[in-house]
Amino acid sequence: MKKNVKRFCISLSFFLVISSLLFGQEKTNKPIITIGKFERIFDQSLGEDDVWYMNDHCFIKGPEGKWHMIGITGREAPKPWAENFLAHAVADSLNGKWVKKPYAMAARSDLDEMVLWAPHIIKHDDTYYMYYCAGDPDHRRYQINLATSKDLYEWSRYTGNPLFVDGFDGRDPFIFHDEINNRWIMYYTATMKPEGGNHIVGARISYDLVHWTKDRYVVYIDPEKGTWGGNTESPVVIKRGDWYYLFIGPGASYVTTKVFKSRDLFSWDLTDEVITLETHAAEIIRNDDGKWYISHCGLKRGGLYLAPFYWHDEVQDKLDSK
């Protein structure tokens, strides 16, 4: 009897130790994200006769070593289909002095480009690939287009545009390089059906950055239904260790970005939400010194803002210790 009790106690202790380790590890993997104070870094209104705003945008290092920002811009009281230019600014560092440049691109009505929305740029080999939404007279068939450049100043549209179409108002492309499988995944916002329905994050795969899968993956479904804007705009995906973090917004308010985590690049749901941040059309950027930043912008925001972004997880601890 005593031996059995002893064995039971040893087994129980072993179970508790293992459980503590497992649950402790899971607890440390749960992300805690904080952001610092937002500082305005750029105002498109400079040199204009009226007030202009910045909206969805992206940051990329240029071949000359400078940082470039390209994004949606328009007058503060926009008219429908008035977002026809992509703003362009350049700086020596992310939080340095940003200098306004001529527009990166202008919409071409002869190609049924109704707008220029939400550019995302990546570099592959010696070429910069810019993916953007060009709209369409038919909201069920919004164009996701491609333009390329060698210097981030002169852009050439891909002659095979659109890469694909989707609705309702399919837009906001973001490119994630899946190094494990040597492929690129484009995330974007749309609705369950082209004419409307649940707001979703869709995804398509490419192995050459030009040709994308015909069928989309639905990687996140929001309970809200409708057309136009929804809770799945401005998707961004960041890899941290074994986790993939999906940033989308807005949510309950215009200045909202929700963060979800999953171990699957093609599946997030409501139960995966970990935090809500107060920022609109956020981009998550890592500087040359390894520090992270988050951006903020939008209608009636007075320009483009940047704030320090902190990961409090095991991955960050390892980076900090180097």
Image (cartoon, rainbow, N blue to C red):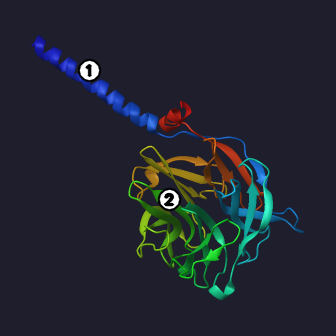
Instruction: Classify residue 118 by image quadrant.
Output: bottom right
When the figure is inspected, residue 62 is found, relative to residue 134, above or below; the finding is above
Q: CA distance from mark 2 to mark 1?
A: 44 Å
Residue 286 appears left or right of 175: right
- Which numbered mark, 2 or 1, is in the foreground of this view? 2
Q: Is residue 69 above or below residue 1?
A: below
- Which residue appears at 64% of the width and 49% of the height? 294
Q: Residue furthest left?
A: 1
Residue 275 rendering spot, x and y as whole percentages: 55, 46
Q: Which residue is mark 2?
A: 176
Residue type at the position of mark 1: Ser
Q: Quadrant of residue 141?
A: bottom right
Q: How many marks?
A: 2
Q: Secondary structure at mark 2?
A: strand
Please state the horizontal and vertical placement of residue 274, each as a whole percent of the image.
50, 45
Frontmost residue, 145 versus 210: 210
**In this picture, is 113 found above or below 225?**
below
For residue 58, say whether it is visible: yes
Residue placed under numbered mark 1 in the picture: 13
The reply to whether dot 2 and dot 1 touch (C-beta < 8 Å) is no
Residue at x-position 55% and y-position 71%: 226
The kind of residue tagged 2 is Phe
- Mark 2 neighbour class, 10 Å CA radius: few under 14, some 14 to 19, many 20 or more: some
x%, y% of residue 287?
64, 46
Quadrant that contains the C terminus: top right
